[in-house]
Image (cartoon, rainbow, N blue to C red):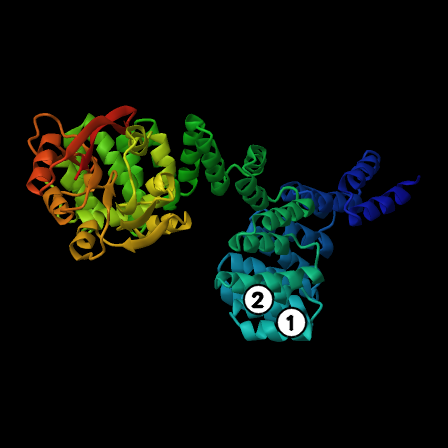
Amino acid sequence: MSLEQMFLEAKALYRAGKYAEAEQNCRQILSQIPENADVLNLVGLIAHAKGYPDTAVSYFERVLRQNQNLAPTWFNMAVSLTACGKYKEALEAYQNVIRCRPDVKETYNNMGGVYEKLNRLQNAYNAYRQALALDPAYVDAAVNLAVLEHNTEALKALCEKHPQSALPLYYLGLEAFKQGDYHAAARLLQKALKNERTSAEIWFQCGLTAQALGKEKNAQKCYHQVLALEPKNVPALVNLANLTHDETLYVTALGLNHQNAEAHTGYADLLYAQNRKTEALEEYRKAVILNPDIPQISNNLGLVLKDLGDYEQALDLFMNAFLKEKHTKDYAINISETLVLLYRQSPERAVEIAKLWVQNAPGNVLAEHTLASLTAEGSDKDALYSEEYFDIFAKCYEDVMQKIRYNIINKIKELQIELKGKILDLGCGTGMAAMILKTNENSFTGVDISQKMLEIAKSKDVYERLVKDDIRHFLDTNVEKFDKIIAFDVLNYVEDMAGILSAARGVPLVFSVENAPQNVAELEISPAGRYRHNPVYIRRLLIECGYQNIQSHQFALRLEENEPVEGTLFQAQ
């Protein structure tokens, strides 16, 4: 085969997407004619198509050193420079295209895109107008101009005028996505795909839209399509890794771009979930360095440091996240929990930080309650605190209860406590108790201050009625008759135990309390924000409320920092 035939075959292979075979042919030619301009230009195109735009630039430069008047090569180099993020150099290359060939409409259209990346919007507008001056029917430039001007009506008109064009449909779909209308976005993007099946950009946006609609399998298919077209597409690799939890995809993405904060974050999340905390710590640190202004990354790094016992650094990160997004309650919970842990090591420092938190978040119930707990002053906002805390806690409540070996329901079963008739479940939470204790001989009414907890309880379909209310208010206003009241792991969050027991007067009770230290005569608030009661004090209150048959059972309620928390289960009638 002659060198000319070999080159023609290389071009055909390139057009067919067979880049390795095309490059092999080119290498054979260059071994004999090292500076053949046409072959060097094709090798540059192949390198760009394979995801190596910087390599492509080096080949185009070799061509242009031979001849500075090759408009197509200047154009190719401008495209590769843009892909490298070298926007000013790309504009210079496009100016050289204009010098050689001032009538190429694509040059002005591409320049418009580069000007937009540099936020030189008036220059972008002028470039798109110049492209349209050369060809008024040039759809790409018309679409780009409409997008620049935020002219949705113009995009719709272009869709009607050019029904075979994917570009206006894509941008309409993108706008619908930004507005949160994901169903409309999906319809428009599917139409765009019918017109252009080989656009990685459209496939990628289809993946994002499928994710937004909760269709994760469809999203995965879309990202696989992107990678079939562009194997080195880092955002597609990262999004697919996030969906599939495939470590190799994160490693591949970071190998291609170690400056990608999202890849570091996703990889760190996976490592943390696998309890590989030291590795997760390093990935989160890299992510924070790359993107210090994203609160979620600071929060996640704080979680690792908290688990590793570095409470002050964790608090710095949680506070950084909280001050950027004070409405995100997860950050506040993390601060509160970590302050409690720090308090066990350094009470004065924990109180000092808690005071600073209250100063920076005036009116924040979690901050105020945490400070009150650490200083043992008590709080007049117990109900508000409980509502906020358990709304946040609801999503992981049952997992946590299992982790800390929540033992109250097991104790009920062990003691064979009879629960017949109409049962009032105070602080019912997610319905864990009713789910286990429900029989054909009883029915449950649940009361809880947390709407999120009640939503989970409702899904279990074991309650006759669920009521969102403060338990004291419910007891004071309720007219329904109950055969028994149960309250498990809820009275720890109530200071006025006397009021609760008085309001329940006359109805048999089964409830738990966390035991106070022996030197506490009645009750105290713990640094963790829960009230601890002296069982002798509780027995006295029950007697004062008219209960005569009182039984108590001491046992470990749960674990806290891997240590048993002692409590008492009371039966009274």
Please tell me which residue is depicted at 6% across the width and 31% down the height of the picture.
Answer: 521
Q: Which residue is mark 2?
A: 172
| Quarter occupied by the N terminus | top right
Q: Which residue is mark 1?
A: 159
Q: Position of residue 196 (x, y in %)?
A: 70, 59
Q: Nearer the viewer, residue 121 or 305?
A: 305
- Three-letter amino acid code at the position of disc 2: Leu
Please tell me which residue is depicted at 18% across the width and 30% down the height of the picture.
Answer: 552
| Quarter occupied by the C terminus | top left
Q: Nearer the viewer, residue 242 or 560?
A: 560
- Three-letter amino acid code at the position of disc 1: Cys
Q: Residue furthest top?
A: 563
Task: Identify the secondary structure beneath mark 2.
Answer: helix
Does any portion of residue 136 appear in the rendered image?
Answer: no
Q: How many marks?
A: 2
Mark 2 and mark 1 residues within 8 Å of each other at the beta carbon = yes
Q: Which circle's residue, 2 or 1, is located before the other in the chain?
A: 1
Task: Identify the secondary structure beneath mark 1.
Answer: helix
